[in-house]
Image: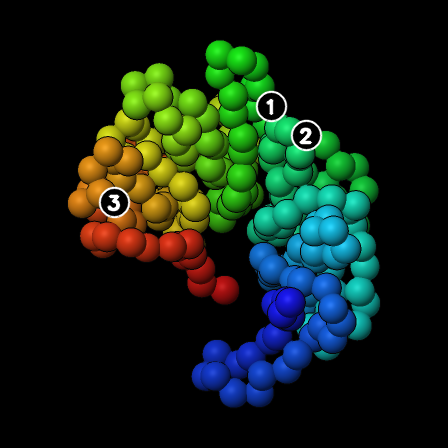
């Protein structure tokens, strides 16, 4: 079947250039802070994913991991956050070279409660990472998601969303004062949409109503 390829294009919609030309599927590109490289996930045979980097002209292709998805470059360019795991999905960090791969979050997996972590996004000052944690909700007896933050050393884990504003797909504002996310009460479809909140979870406000997908708050 058809697979997504990577392109770069000018902000005015001109000068589109294709970077990849094979049968693999590519997704989740993230710019390096200097704008000279892209990190991305590549899906190869049998759906196996790995993380790679390349230069903007398509050269310098380099494989960083044998698995993983949703890579995100830190603001200082030194570290890449990504998600990894088969049974338990967690957030990992590695050096921009692919070295020093280490576990950042430790979601639990047991019969009474299970967790999975996805979609890391760096704060602009590089000190914290927002991410989405899916977990069992005893109130609704369903699998729900909430937005968490954690420091880059793995300490200070904090949940920001509450039962009536479940959250996913967090993205920091460029000045670090707010986080936009997809939220709402799973039991009330009319309450779903895009929300913003302060980094401590306070001041939650809905921006849109109804279906929305993958908010991204970026100024480069």
Residue highlighted by disc 1 = 106
Q: First in sequence: mark 3 or mark 1? A: 1
Pointer 3: residues within 10 angstroms few (<14), some, or many (20+)? many
User: Do the residues bearing badges 1 and 2 touch, measured as CB atoms within 8 Å?
Assistant: yes
**Local SS, label 3:** loop
| Quadrant of the image occupied by residue 81 | top right
Depth check, front residue: 42 or 217? 42
Spot occupied by residue 98 in the image (x, y as percentages of width and height): 78, 46
Residue highlighted by disc 3 = 192
Q: First in sequence: mark 2 or mark 3? A: 2
At horizontal 61% and vertical 60% (from top left) the residue drawn is 27
**Local SS, label 2:** strand
At horizontal 72% and vertical 41% (from top left) the residue drawn is 94
Q: In the picture, which quadrant includes the N terminus?
A: bottom right
Residue 143 to residue 54: above or below: above
Residue 29 to residue 144: above or below: below
| Quadrant of the image occupied by residue 60 | bottom right
Q: Is residue 78 visible?
A: no
Mark 1 to mark 2 CA distance (whole Å): 7 Å
At horizontal 76% and vertical 71% (from top left) the residue drawn is 22
- Of marks 2 and 3, the one in the foreground: 3
At horizontal 74% and vertical 75% (from top left) the residue drawn is 21
Pointer 2: residues within 10 angstroms few (<14), some, or many (20+)? some
Spot occupied by residue 184 in the image (x, y as percentages of width and height): 27, 39
**What's the mark number on residue 103?**
2
Residue 77 to residue 166: above or below: below
């Amino acid at each position: 079947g058809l697979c997504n390829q990577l392109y770069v294009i000018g902000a005015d919609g001109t000068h589109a250039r294709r970077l990849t030309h094979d049968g693999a599927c590519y997704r989740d590109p993230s710019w390096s802070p200097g704008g000279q490289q892209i990190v991305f996930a590549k899906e190869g045979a049998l759906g196996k994913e790995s993380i790679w980097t390349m230069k903007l002209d398509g050269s310098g292709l380099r494989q960083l991991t044998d698995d993983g998805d949703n890579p995100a470059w830190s603001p200082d360019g030194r570290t890449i956050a990504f998600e990894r795991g088969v049974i338990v999905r967690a957030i990992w960090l590695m050096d921009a070279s692919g070295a020093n791969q280490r576990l950042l979050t430790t979601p639990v997996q047991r019969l009474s409660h299970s967790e999975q972590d996805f979609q890391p996004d760096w704060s602009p000052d590089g000190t914290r990472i927002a991410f989405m944690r899916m977990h069992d909700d005893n109130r609704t007896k369903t699998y729900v998601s909430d937005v968490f933050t954690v420091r880059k050393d793995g300490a200070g884990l904090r949940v920001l969303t509450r039962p009536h504003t479940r959250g996913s797909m967090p993205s920091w504002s460029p000045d670090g004062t707010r986080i936009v996310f997809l939220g709402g009460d799973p039991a009330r479809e009319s309450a779903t949409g895009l929300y913003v909140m302060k980094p401590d979870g306070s001041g939650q406000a809905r921006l849109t109503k109804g279906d929305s997908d993958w908010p991204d708050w970026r100024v480069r």
